[in-house]
Image: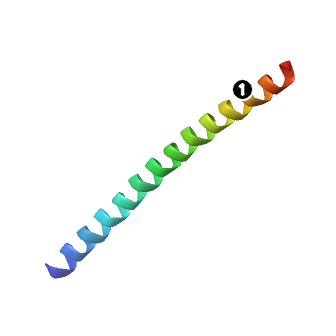
C-alpha cells in the first residue's frame, strides 16, 4: 500500500512538471511573438525616416 501511494505521488509530480513545462513554453512563445512585433514595428519606423 505504501509503495502504491509513492507511485501515485511521483505520477502527480511528473504530471505537474509536464503541465508547468507546457505553460512555460506557451508563455515564452507569446513573449517571443510580442518581442518580434515590437522589433518589427521599430524597424519599420526607422525605415520611414
Residue at image point 55% right, 38% down: 30
Vertical order, 27 against 19 (above or below): above
Q: Position of residue 36 (x, y in %)?
A: 68, 35
Extreme residue toward the left, this view: 1
45 relative to 24 in the view: left or right:
right
Residue 4 lies in what quarter of the image?
bottom left
Q: Position of residue 47 (x, y in %)?
A: 86, 23
Element type where label 1 sits in the image: helix
Residue toward you, 37 or 20: 37
Residue at image point 29% right, 63% down: 12
| Residue designated by label 1 | 41
Q: Position of residue 31 (x, y in %)?
A: 56, 41
- Which image quadrant: the N terminus? bottom left
- Which image quadrant: the C terminus? top right
20 relative to 3 in the view: left or right:
right
2 relative to 13 in the view: left or right:
left
Q: How is the image coloured?
A: rainbow
Amino acid at each position: 500500500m505504501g509503495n502504491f501511494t509513492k507511485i501515485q505521488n511521483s505520477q502527480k509530480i511528473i504530471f505537474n512538471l509536464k503541465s508547468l513545462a507546457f505553460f512555460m513554453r506557451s508563455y515564452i512563445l507569446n513573449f517571443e511573438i510580442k518581442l518580434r512585433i515590437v522589433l518589427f514595428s521599430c524597424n519599420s519606423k526607422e525605415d520611414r525616416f
